[in-house]
Amino acid sequence: MNKFGEFLKQKRLEKKMGLRKFARIVNIDPSYIIRIERGTVPPPGEKETLDFFAEALDFAPDSDDYKKLFDLSAQERGSYVPEDVKSKFGNPELIPIFLRTIASKKLDKEEIESIVNYIKENY
């Protein structure tokens, strides 16, 4: 399934933005954009390119749509850590250690959500 491409197309159409206009704004060939939307090529993984997409679609950096754009790109590229997260993490090499630590504790969804909420409220 091509969730990134479907999401991109849906959001572009919600903005009433044609393919060529979007491609011109992000400075990418329209044929490449259509292949992304159809899922015949993987989505871009570079933060800069995804930021161009987000800006063209008026996604605020802290919005759910911005995060979803990066998350879907990472998932379809086989990564579990989106580029926007990697770029904000002081020591990206610690991300796998952090995730393995959580995984080793065999926490359920509620416990993980509790940890996330604690971090959001206290840091």
Image (spheres, rainbow, N blue to C red):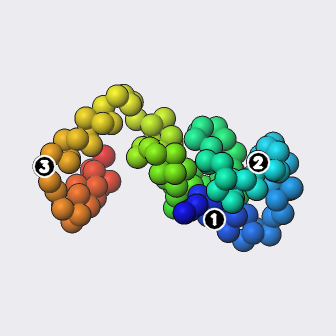
Q: Residue at x 61, y 47 (%)?
A: 42
Callout 1 touching callout 3 (CB < 8 Å): no
The residue pinned by badge 3 equals 105
What is the x, y in percent for residue 102? Answer: 20, 47
Nearer to us of marks 1 and 3 is: 1
Q: Residue at x 23, y 57 (%)?
A: 112
The residue pinned by badge 2 equals 32
Distance from Cα at disc 1 to Cα at disc 3: 35 Å
Q: Quadrant of the N terminus?
A: bottom right
Distance from Cα at disc 1 to Cα at disc 2: 14 Å
The kind of residue on which mark 2 rests is Tyr
- Image quarter of residue 15: bottom right
Callout 1 touching callout 2 (CB < 8 Å): no
> Which of marks 3 and 1 precedes in the sequence?
1
| Residue sitting at the far front | 40
The answer to whether residue 114 shows anywhere in this view is no
The residue pinned by badge 1 equals 6
- The circle on residue 47 is none
What is the x, y in percent for residue 30? Answer: 82, 51
Distance from Cα at disc 3 to Cα at disc 2: 43 Å
The answer to whether residue 79 shows anywhere in this view is yes
Q: Nearer the viewer, residue 61 or 72?
A: 72
The kind of residue on which mark 3 rests is Lys
Nearer to us of marks 3 and 2 is: 2
Secondary structure beneath dot 2 equals helix
Disc 2 crowd rating (10 Å Cα; few below 14, some 14-19, many 20+) is: some
The kind of residue on which mark 1 rests is Glu
47 lies above or below 13: above
